[in-house]
Image (cartoon, rainbow, N blue to C red):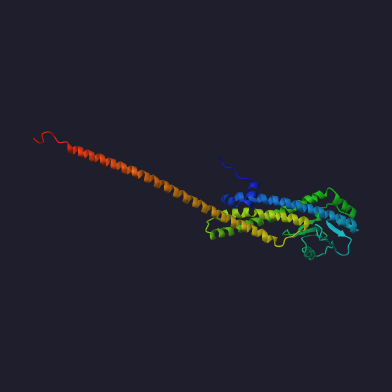
Amino acid sequence: MEEKKPGFFKKLWTSIRDFEKYEEFAADKIISAIKYILILILIFIMIVTLAYTFKFYNVVSDVKEYISEQIEEISLENGKLTISSKEPIIIENEKSIVPIIIIDTDKYADPEKYLEKINLYDTGILVLHDKITISNNLLAQDQSIYYSNIFTENINNKEELINLISGNKMMYTYMLFFVTVFVYLFIIYFSSNIVDAIVLGALGYIFARIVKLRLRFKATFNIGIHALTLPIILNLIYIMVNTFTNFTISYFQWMYTTVSYIYVAVAILMIKTEIINQKIQLMKLEKIQEKVATEDTLEVEPKEKEKEEKKEEQREEKEEKDSGEQPEGSNA
């Protein structure tokens, strides 16, 4: 009967807490390890994207409130936004989910200049004449949403814009935002984690040689993939906390990397220890077998000797008997 393979969540729990099972992970197929990390990344991306989408929803609500209270005239024609303001509008609030929002609808505005200021914060939004750019320090690249992809109708005043932002059509915007961020994050995180697993596999291969353990790169690569489990979960927790509280941890990436390295090293040492224990048990078994064989030999030898002695006695008795019998008439 074929042994049932552990499910995803069983592997996840085992990868975090049971180093002894890493020997089984090392012997697993590469396709199985990649499937595991793929599912883990998909769950990770799904949760993070939902959080970012919720955050974007709150930002839209804040923008709607600001437009209603602070801006007198606003229009959107052919995907180009115009706001009645001679100077750029800069909204800074460190306690807000989005600590900085910069609005400049001048078509000659320099976005790089504003992004330099926004990058001083964990999160920021830049509103330009043709697009909205969202910046976050956890994203490798800023995300831009063009008005022409969201609004198909021209808007002549702020009341129309507020009604449009409040209407059901914004669901399409949120869905577009969700899909865009999901695809982008999947490409970034999946490729980066595969690269991390390859690096961990290479370092694990070298470390295994140092401790005189012969492991194939396939085995150390599988170990590297499962060693990323806890760092990915910690990264997810950190992103969620940072997204809703703006709490940051300095050098978090170093901690992320260090944890995965420790897992690889400990897993390899555990495999070596297990192999040594197996050799010790095998040596003990061989000694027991030798002892049993020796005892059997010692038991057989006296019996054989006794049998030989008995045969010798019987032969001597026969010879004496034969020599004692004289033929008749020999003394005549």
Location of residue 224 by image quarter: bottom right
Percent x, y of residue 154: 86, 53
Quarter in which the N terminus is drawn: top right
Location of residue 52 by image quarter: bottom right
Percent x, y of residue 137: 74, 60
Question: How many numbered discs sit on the rendered protein?
Answer: 0
Percent x, y of residue 3: 57, 42
Residue at 42%, 48% in the rendered image:
291
- The answer to whether residue 218 is seen in the rendering is no
Location of residue 235 by image quarter: bottom right
State the residue lying farthest toward the top: 328
Of the pair 179 and 225, the residue shown nearer to us: 225
242 left or right of 204 in image = right
Quarter in which the C terminus is drawn: top left
Residue at 44%, 50% in the rendered image:
287
Residue at 85%, 58% in the rendered image:
81
Of the pair 111 and 264, the residue shown nearer to us: 264
81 left or right of 18 in image = right
Of the pair 20 and 208, the residue shown nearer to us: 20
306 left or right of 41 in image = left
Of the pair 148 and 54, the residue shown nearer to us: 54
24 left or right of 163 in image = left
Percent x, y of residue 132: 80, 58
- The answer to whether residue 316 is seen in the rendering is yes
State the residue lying farthest toward the right: 72
